[in-house]
Image (tube, helix red, strand yellow):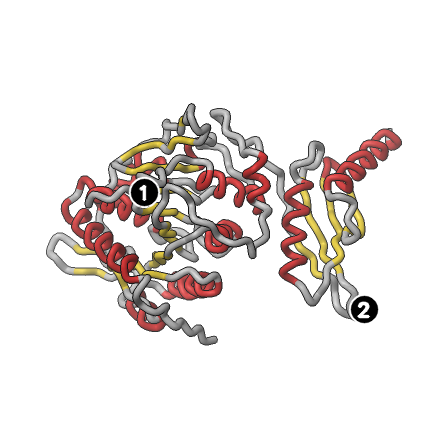
Amino acid sequence: MFGSKDKSRRKLEEKIIQTLGQPDWLESVTIGEDGRVVLVIKADPAQPEAAEARRIEAEGKVELISGVSSVSSVLTAERAASAPAKEVHLSHTPASKRVRKGARLSDDALQQGKVPSAAPKSSIPGISRILVVASAKGGVGKSTVSVNLAVAMAKAGMKVGLMDADIYGPSIPTMLGTVSSEPTTSQESGKLLPVEAAGLKTLSIGYLSDPDAPMIWRGPIVMSAITQMLNDAEWGTPEDPLDILIIDTPPGTGDAQLTIAQRIPVTAALIVTTPQEVALADVRRGAAMFAKTEVPVLGIVETMSWFEDPSGNRHYLMGQGGGSATANALGLPLLAELPMLQAIREGGDSGQPAALTDETAGQLFHELARKVAIELDGLATKPTPDIVFED
């Protein structure tokens, strides 16, 4: 019994080493019960970013090997005996097959996810401008702003695309009423044809995956999914391009955000927040990420700014003035203060965006769309704001 297990583990270990190319930086491979793998990777303490990139790539390759149920790694380096080795957790069950409707990442897309971060950005045919809508904190209404801003721009006559890059929690299909839709493939180019809804061209991993299945994907696979949705779809043509592609990003400043900021020709970013300090602290971190990746930030949109009762009195349930103060501190404009409106919530749940169905919400998002367009047009002529972050 034990001999059989040992033989199976040895075969798996040989396959892992072969997959990684027998590198000199791989100190050891340990295979536990049920296919749990631990990699010990030699790292140069003087080059932590290179070591982290190597770790992510190695784990991404190993987790796709048949028989591997989870991967974790330890980075080691020559240092004083008292200094502990840096241990990296990251253990999960791979889920590269947790999709339906025939969805599959191409081999080219898998390789795109492994391009070095320093790779030059190239323009994407058929897309004139790319705007990312971001929030360093979840639950602030980022997707709601993305959908209604896109709808307002389309309503104003622009050719607009909307890409849902929130791999782990895709909400665009629900907000547009397209949960049961799925993209088709062009017979001429072989590329995905985005789903059209509310005057938009849209793509989301939600169109390709089981809505009840969790997307338990690691960094390299997430990066590949994003780049494939962007590059392997017919958003437009060089002769008839989109005026703008809006990308709804997941919350935080992790793999997906860095992939978009570093490897995609992003024109600018828009940051969404609520007024309370716990969200504003994350706004400052998000703005710092875009500053470091040289992506211009157009401004800040504050949601849930107030609630107005039937008597016309405003109640600042989430705090007051936080968005304005933070925008001023960062040298950025506050582009909108969006109140709590029942129509906005109902529109998101019903798949009928409030920018199309409600007069008050429509005016708010139309004004936001106008300001965003002005800021985008002014990028070529105004200097980049000097953002200073203090401890």
Q: Which residue: 54% across, 38% down?
A: 109
Is residue 347 among what the camera can see? yes
Q: Which residue: 31% across, 71% down?
A: 328
Please say if 346 is above or below 256: above
Q: Looking at the picture, how far across and down is residue 76, in whole percent?
A: 75, 59
Q: CA distance from mark 1 to mark 2?
A: 58 Å
Binning the other alpha carbons within 10 Å of mark 2 as few (below 14), some (14 to 19) or many (20 upward) gives few
Q: Residue furthest right?
A: 3
204 vs 383, nearest the viewer: 383
Please say if 332 is above or below 126: below
**Which comes sooner in the sequence, label 1 or label 2?**
2
The amino acid type, in three-letter code, at marker 2 is Ala
Tell me the quadrant of the picture where the N terminus can be found.
Answer: top right
The amino acid type, in three-letter code, at marker 1 is Leu
**Which residue, given by chain and number where applicable, does mark 2 sit on?**
81
Please say if 113 is above or below 253: above
Q: Is residue 31 left or right of residue 156?
A: right
